[in-house]
Image (spheres, grey):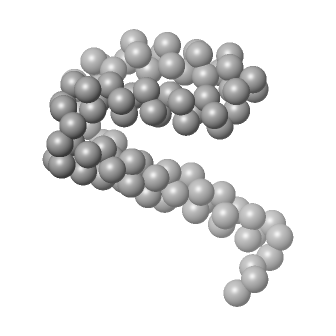
C-alpha cells in the first residue's frame, strides 16, 4: 500500500510535482499511453537500481498489484456505487 511515513514522502515531493505538471500538460495528447510510459520508466529505473532478480521482480509485481487494488478500492468502487445510485442496480 502507498501509506509511507510523511517524512519519507518529502523525498518524493519535488518529483511528484514535476510528474503532475508534465501529465497535466500532456494527458490530452498522449492519453493512457503516456501514463503507461511513465509507469514503465519508473519501474525500469527501480529495476536498474535494485538489479534484476527474483526478489526485485516480485517486489515490482507486488507494488503494481497493490496499487491496482488500492485504486479500485479508493476510486473505482466508489464511482461504481455512485453510478448504481444514479442508474439503478442490475443485481
Toward the viewer: 85 or 32?
32
Quarter of the image containing the C terminus?
A: bottom right
Residue at 44%, 20% in the rendered image = 16
Label count reads 0
What percent of the width, then of the height, locates residue 89? 75, 79
What percent of the width, then of the height, locates residue 74? 50, 53
Side (left or right) of 9 relative to 64 = left
Side (left or right) of 41 relative to 35 = left
Toward the viewer: 28 or 16?
28
Residue at 32%, 25% in the rendered image = 45
Side (left or right) of 30 relative to 39 = right
Choose top left, top right, bottom left or bottom right for residue 5.
top left
Asked whether residue 6 appears in the rendered view, the answer is no
Toward the viewer: 82 or 77?
77
Residue at 16%, 47% in the rendered image = 55
Side (left or right) of 13 relative to 85 = left
Toward the viewer: 13 or 47?
47
- Image height check: is 18 above or below 51? above
What percent of the width, then of the height, locates residue 19? 51, 19
Residue at 61%, 29% in the rendered image = 34
Amino acid at each position: 500500500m502507498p501509506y509511507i511515513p510523511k517524512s519519507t514522502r518529502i523525498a518524493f515531493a519535488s518529483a511528484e510535482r514535476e510528474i503532475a505538471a508534465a501529465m497535466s500538460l500532456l494527458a490530452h495528447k498522449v492519453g493512457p499511453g503516456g501514463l503507461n510510459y511513465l509507469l514503465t520508466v519508473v519501474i525500469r529505473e527501480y529495476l536498474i537500481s535494485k538489479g534484476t532478480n527474483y526478489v526485485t521482480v516480485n517486489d515490482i509485481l507486488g507494488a503494481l498489484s497493490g496499487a491496482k487494488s488500492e485504486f479500485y478500492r479508493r476510486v473505482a468502487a466508489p464511482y461504481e456505487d455512485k453510478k448504481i445510485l444514479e442508474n439503478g442496480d442490475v443485481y
